Image: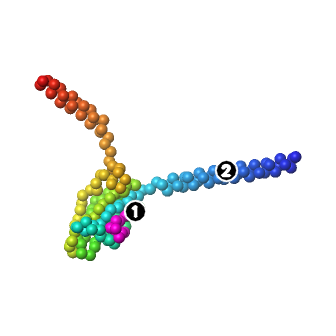
Amino acid sequence: MRRFQNESMKIGGTASSMIRFLSTASCCLFLTVAAFAQSDRGTITGAVADPAGAVVANAPIQARNVATGALYEGASSSMGNYTLAELPAGTYEISVAVQGFKEYVRQGLTIQVAQVARIDIPLEVGATSDSVTITAEAPLLNTENGELSHSQPRLRQDRKWRRRWCRGLFANTSAKR
């Protein structure tokens, strides 16, 4: 009987240590995945097209980080689409130079953490020595996933103002009757 109890204790001890090992491994795996999920990177995506709206395949695209000077390169696909992923947050300058078209340069493009900025590139016919430089900001509407890139913290104040304005409007119309 005593021998049977010792064997069951060994089995129970092994099962207990196995459970402890599996739970520790699960926690480590979960923490590792959570650590990699936090990123300081963003993405620039879009399409390259000619003046007629036809796609331009294999167009070389460069994004230069203004602060660090780091250069990230890519090319448009056969469908004219491109994606420059895993860009560190910062301000970028995008350039595209294709034979038969003017060089396209877009300056002052700010990429934030986890942002997907859609920048469609319209090329103009001309020599590559000519260039079209765009310095406008990216649109606030994120067309890649429908999110807005800004918030409206003054919404409550706007509602109060609207209520007061409407009261005044209706007060004036009822007085004229």
Q: Which mark is residue 85?
A: 1
For the residue pair 26 and 52, the one nearer the viewer reads as 52
What amino acid type should be assigned to the residue bearing mark 1?
Ala
Question: Which image quadrant for residue 107?
Answer: bottom left
Residue 34 placement, left or right of 158: right
In this rendering, the answer to whether 170 lies above or below 42 is: above
Task: Examine the rendering and report whether any part of residue 95 can be seen.
Answer: no
In this rendering, the answer to whether 163 lies above or below 49 is: above
Residue 24: where, in percent of width, then height? 63, 52
Residue range (magenta): 73-83
Per the image, the residue denoted by label 2 is 20
Residue 31: where, in percent of width, then height? 55, 52
Q: Residue at x 35, y 61 (%)?
A: 44
Q: Residue at x 37, y 55 (%)?
A: 115
Which image quadrant: the C terminus? top left
Residue 22 included in the magenta stretch of the image: no
